[in-house]
Amino acid sequence: MTPEEKDGTRGSGPEALDSVGWTSAYTLRLVSADAPIELELGGRMGPIDVEYETYGVLSPRKDNVVFIAHALSGDAHVAGWDKDTDKNGRVWRQRKPGWWDAVVGPGKAIDTNRYFVICPNVLGSCYGTTGPASIDPRTSKPYGLHFPMVTVGDWVKLHARLLDALGIEHVHAVMGGSLGGQQALELALAFPDRVERAVVLASSARLSAQGLAFNAVARYCILNDPNFAGGDYYGSDKGPDAGLAAARMLAHITYLSDEGMHEKFGRRLQRNIEQKAGFGIEFAVESYLDYQGRAFVERFDANSYLYVTRAMDYYDAAAAWGNGNLVEACRRVRANALVVSFDSDWLYPPEDCKDLAMALARTGVRVTYAEVPSRFGHDSFLVETQKVGRLLRSFLAH
Amino acid sequence: MSQPRADHNLVTDRGLARLPEGLFEQRAAAIVALMKARAQRPASEPASLRWQEEIISREIPMGASVLDLGCGDGFLLERLIRERNVRGQGVEIDPDQVFSCVDRGVPVIQADLGAGLRWCPDKAFDVVVLEETLQTLQNPREVLEEMLRVGKRGIVSFPNFAHYRVIIDLAARSRMPVTERLPYYWYESANIHLLTLRDLLDWAGSSGVNIVSGYALVDGAPRELRADDDLLAEEVLVVVERT
């Protein structure tokens, strides 16, 4: 028995046989300052650096690419253990592997012995790709709210540029959950000839009114935090932490289901609460949200939250590609599609996901639509790794 | 909702008198004779449950587009994709079965057939298959109509509730029949709209639907459907199209 086996780290740490192990991100200047790209909502942008990670080996024919798009608060660190936390300061990554580690690795559902996995961080986010916290070359100060509005369409154009830079013409599959699912759909719409399979998890062609409303409240919390300072808080020792934490707490409520929350927390009180006496953290569910809020402030930039939620709000595949008609838009798609919803998801409810699947089916492309029973709400696409993994493994294999 | 039928040949205690003289006795005797004749024979090998799939595979042209309504675990579509190079699409309500379809590489949409096929344009498929599913549906007539709207042809199969053993089981035991092909007790059966060969032919006749070809499972073996198979056919498979 090795020491690792003894202390139980086998099967979970970077040395585990099914882990991609220690990872290191790449950064690539995809857009130079002298050749900026046109943005969908107007204006030009350059330079743009993109941070991305890859796992596995690109085949000589370059036909084994699985492109993963991350969700709202995600990053390029899909799997494995970040080797560079000392340099990049992302110390929270020392505690846990990438956000989809259960699904991506040697022998796992997205088998890195077989596939070459790529995931970039999106424009406007805060994990190495150019965003509001990056230095604006015109002012030599952080962009803040001078950062231009970016869209899912812009992200996907950059995704295509990244593929170009890596010499990859076609992807075996593009996939993502939530906002990542919309990028997968958008890549299949904008570059139909480059996508063989598209997987859209817990996502649809556009966010519902309820989803827009949640994002509006989240931004209100940030914009009205006394420390927000018009987005120009980078030099200050106080940022809009309370606003960002509140935004994250709200978001977490939307990621769970009523049933899941009841099961996980019920009306339980925290252990150290002896009597109900005020407005502190008393219930277990309060403690959970408080922790999630605080942890998020450590790792996310409030301005990025504004930009990325706005991109999420604006995305509307039917408007972008079909004059408001989703079926017309879907006629562009050449990829085989897998759309998966979760019955307890109320952020991207099954009916909305199904509308997308049905629109795709109507155009005659090969579509699979599965509504997975789960009590984990929107989070299911991250949590139901057995079920989601089985669907992904089989879908990629055919 | 459909109206109760005020019917010409409905058999009530009074109506029995209106049946052609001796018809009922004649039918009853025929059923008993069938049973006795078959009791003398050596038991036939039970037919493979997949007998229909042999026929369906033969009936479907190479390269056709096929929609399988209630496709279960995708076994049939996988075979059609492999052997007949079809463009296959399944529809199935049970999530476990949907997972099995994905494992087989069969495209499947998880949906309730009762909700219709609004997503599917007219005549989008060369063939639409409704294998052993009709009798489980909440609204079978609407699904049959949808089948012929979205498909150029339909293939429908179902257990024939007028098979002589079913009739005898019901008559002799006064309980819902439990047979090899209808193996469930009434309270656990998914078969909520059982029908007979004649019922299907009546529907076709009154709906402008033409029977292109038909097959019956008789004494454990499949063969072409004959006009007088209504007591003998355990299962029926017909290919239909709009006239």
Image: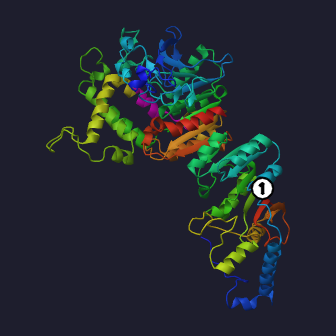
**Is A69 positioned to the left or the right of B137 in the image?**
left
> Between A338 and A327, which is closer to the camera in this rendering?
A338
Residue at the spot 82% in from the left edge and 60% down from the top edge: B222
Secondary structure under tag 1 reads helix
Q: Is residue B213 magenta?
A: no
- The percent coordinates of residue A60 (x first, y second) are 67, 16
Q: Badge 1 sits on which subunit?
A: B
Q: Which residues are magenta?
A: A307-318
Residue at the spot 78% in from the left edge and 65% down from the top edge: B208
Q: Identify the image quadrant of the C terminus of chain A.
A: top right
Q: Which residue is mark 1?
A: B51
- The percent coordinates of residue B36 (x first, y second) are 80, 77
Q: In this rendering, is residue B219 above or below A178?
A: below
- The percent coordinates of residue A129 (x first, y second) are 45, 17
- Residue A213: quadrant of the picture: top left
Q: Identify the image quadrant of the N terminus of chain A.
A: top left
- The percent coordinates of residue B60 (x first, y second) are 81, 49
> Between B170 and A302, which is closer to the camera in this rendering?
B170
> Between B69 and B210, which is closer to the camera in this rendering?
B69
- Dominant secondary structure, magenta: helix
